[in-house]
Image: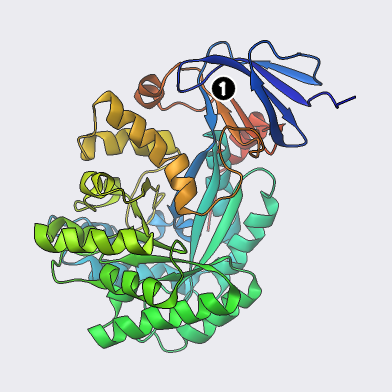
Amino acid sequence: MSRLPDIVITNARMRSREIVDIAITDGVITAIGSRLDPGAQSVIDAKGGLVTPAFVNPHLHLCKVWTLPMMSEAALEAYQGGDMTEAAKAIELAAVVKSNYDASWIIPNARRAVALAALHGNLHIRAFADVDTKARLEGVKALLAIREEFRGIVEIQVVAFPQDGLLREPGADDLMRKAMALGADVVGGIPWIEADEQGMRRHIDFCFDLAAEHGADISMLLDDVGDANMRTLDMMARAVIARGVEGRALAHHCRAMALYPKNYLRELMALLGKARISVVSDPHTGPLHARVEELLDADINVALGQDDISDAYYPLGRNNMLEVAFLASHLLWMTKKSELETLYDMITTRAAAAMNLERYGLGLGCDANLVVLDQGDVTEALRFHTPPRIVISHGRVVDMNRMRALAQTTVDA
C-alpha cells in the first residue's frame, strides 16, 4: 500500500485559477488534483489563496546588508547619480566599510536578512561575498556559515566576488582561489571595473578558468555604469560560446545596455541567445537598467534581484521579492495583466532558471518549496506584496514566528 502524504494543501488556487489539492511526501510534490485523500499527517487549507513555487532571489550582496549606517551616503549619491558615470567612484567609496570586515558581525547581519527572506517566502538566494585584500575572506566565511545554518529552510548559493577587481587589486586572484576551496558555490566577476579592455578580458578569463576548475557556475556584474561604450557583457557571452559552457553564466545589471544603439542591441541579444545567458535586472537600485522588455521579446531569460539591503548602494530592501516585482512594474512600466504575470515569473520560474535550480516548480516530482498567499491572483499578490500566510520549505512548514523574531533582531557591528 502506498504511503500517505505528510502534507495535503487543500483549496489551493493555481495561477491558471484552477482549485486543486496538493500532496507532499518526503519533501516532494507527489500528487495534484481535486479532492485528494486528506489522510495526511497535516492538512493545510489554502482557502482559495494562490499557491506557487517559492520566490527566488538571484542577486543579493549578503555580506553588505545593514552596513549603510557605518558610512556616509557619498557612495549612494555617486552610484545613483542621474547618468551613472560615477559608478566606479561609488565602489571605491563603499569599500571603506571593508577595512572593518569581520565574520563576527557579518553573520548576525546576514542572519537577519535571510530570516526576512524566509518570512517573505524567498527560499533561494544567490548571495555575493566580496573577496579582496580589504574584505579578505571574512564575507565568504560568514556566508558559508549562514548557508549551513539555514540549510533546509533557505537555500543559499555563495558567490566569491572580486568587487574591486582582479588586476586593480593585487592578491585578489589568490583569495578567489581560496574562497572557492573553502566551499563557495559560484565564481563571481566584475570585469568592467578593470582599467582597460585587456584587463577586462583577463578578468573574464581568470573567472572562467577558476569556474572550470571547480565545476562551478559564473555570475558577473557587467557594464554597471553609464557608458555606452562598455561591452563586457559581449565579452562574457563570447567567452561562454568559445568555452562551450552555454547556460552556465549569469549576467547581472548590464545597465549600459540602456544606452546602446538599437542595431548593436539586436546583435548583442542574438549573442546572448546563442550563449543561453540569463540577465538579472535590479531596476530599483539605480537610474539605468537593462532593456528588460526588449530582452524578453527576444526570448532572453530575465529575472529580478533584490541586489542590496541597507548598504552603500541602496538604503531600503527586505528580501521581499514580491516587493521587488511591485517596484519593477512601475520602473519598467510593466502594468498590463500579462506583464504582471511575467514579473511574477521573473521572481519565480525565470529566476530559478537563471540560477540553474533543479526540481524547482509546482509539478509532480518537484521539491515542495511553496508559498500559500492570502491573495487569489498575481495582480493582488503584487498589489499588497505582504508575506505569505504559509511558507513550505522542503516539505515542512517554516516556523514564521521564529523567522519573524530573527528578522526583528537589531545588529550592532
Report whether 95 appears left or right of 176: left
SS type, badge 1:
loop
The residue at 76%/13% (across/down) is 37
Q: Quadrant of the N terminus?
A: top right
Give how far across and how far down residue 155 sits, in percent: 61, 49
Q: Position of residue 283 (x, y in %)?
A: 27, 47
Does residue 95 lie above or below 152 as drawn? below
Q: Give the quadrant of residue 96.
A: bottom left
To which residue does mark 1 refer? 389
**Which residue is more in the foreground, 374 or 246?**
246
The reply, left or right, for residue 297 in relation to residue 59 is left
Residue found at x 55% / y 62%: 158
Residue type indicated by callout 1: Arg
Pick the front one: 310 or 239: 239
Residue 9 quadrant = top right
Residue 78 seen anywhere in this rendered image of the structure: no
